[in-house]
Amino acid sequence: MTPLLCSVVRHMKLVRSLLSKIGAATAICLVAFVVASVPNLPRPPVFSDAGAVDTERQPLRVLGTGRPARSTESAASRAIAPHFVVPPEVSGLGLERIEARPPLSELGLASPPKPVKPDDWEGTVLFRPVVTSSASFEAMGHTIFVAGTEPVGPDQSCDFAGVAWRCGERARLAFRYWLRGRAPLCQVFSPAERQPVAAACRLGKQDIGAWLVANGWAYARPGGGYEKAEAVARKAKMGVFGPPD
């Protein structure tokens, strides 16, 4: 490097250092000027370590005028809205039970119980029934004859269009298949009654006597209430009134 170039580089370093010092001094002067131009504001109250308020306060002045405010008396500190901060004491208060409010609508009310109809069924559920004829069975020590019906004799034969067939055996077999694996509800109440009894029976909502007579597998007993069902079975040629199957 030539001596001339070295001299130029050295002068540039000196100029850069001088400019840095001038910029720093200018910034300090600017900050001092801004601080000196701000007016004196009242100092905030100083609290002691014990939390008490310093009673020697500067008098309040109206902002922008410098005039003292009308009241310069120091106010004592007080709790603000203590009922929101600390819950009230309730240990000495008595509790009073009041009535429940009514529901907002009738949807909240419990539905009234269903009225008991005269034909609602009560009785005993008989498990594992064994059919003995087209209108009788045995179950749990009871021998039940379906009330309002007359069974078809097991040896009875029926004639249809000149063709004889063993309708009694077929009627008992139809009742056996229909009742197998089911538990009828019959109107027998006393456990001690083990003798044969005529009782009305149902499977769910199905009247067993009505089913037997309407399908032609039993006859309607006079006055038993199934006369119309037998007339329908005869007209439709159902069961013993129809052809052999």
Image (cartoon, grey):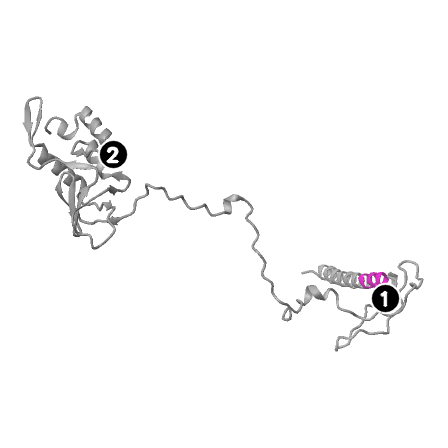
Q: Is residue 19 above or below residue 89?
A: above
Residues in magenta?
26-35
Magenta stretch contains residue 235: no
Q: Is residue 160 above or below residue 144?
A: above
The label number, if any, that marks residue 225 in the structure image: 2
Between residue 96 and residue 88, name the one nearer to us: 96
Between residue 101 and residue 133, name the one nearer to us: 133
Which residue is rendered at x = 69% and y = 60% of the image? 2
Q: Residues within 10 Å of mark 1 (few under 14, many from 20)?
A: few
Report which quarter residue 160 is drawn in. top left
Secondary structure of the magenta portion, mostly?
A: helix
Q: Name the N-terminal-most of marks 2 and 1.
A: 1
Q: Viewer-nearest of labels 2 and 1? A: 2
- The N terminus: image quadrant: bottom right
Residue under circle 1? 42
Which residue is rendered at x = 29% and y = 47% of the image? 122
**Residue positioned most to the front:** 223
Between residue 221 and residue 6, name the one nearer to us: 221
Magenta stretch contains residue 29: yes
Q: Residues within 10 Å of mark 2 (few under 14, many from 20)?
A: some
Which residue is rendered at x = 12% and y = 38% of the image? 172
Which residue is rendered at x = 37% and y = 44% of the image? 116
> Residue 168: percent from the left, percent from the top?
9, 34
Secondary structure at badge 2 equals loop
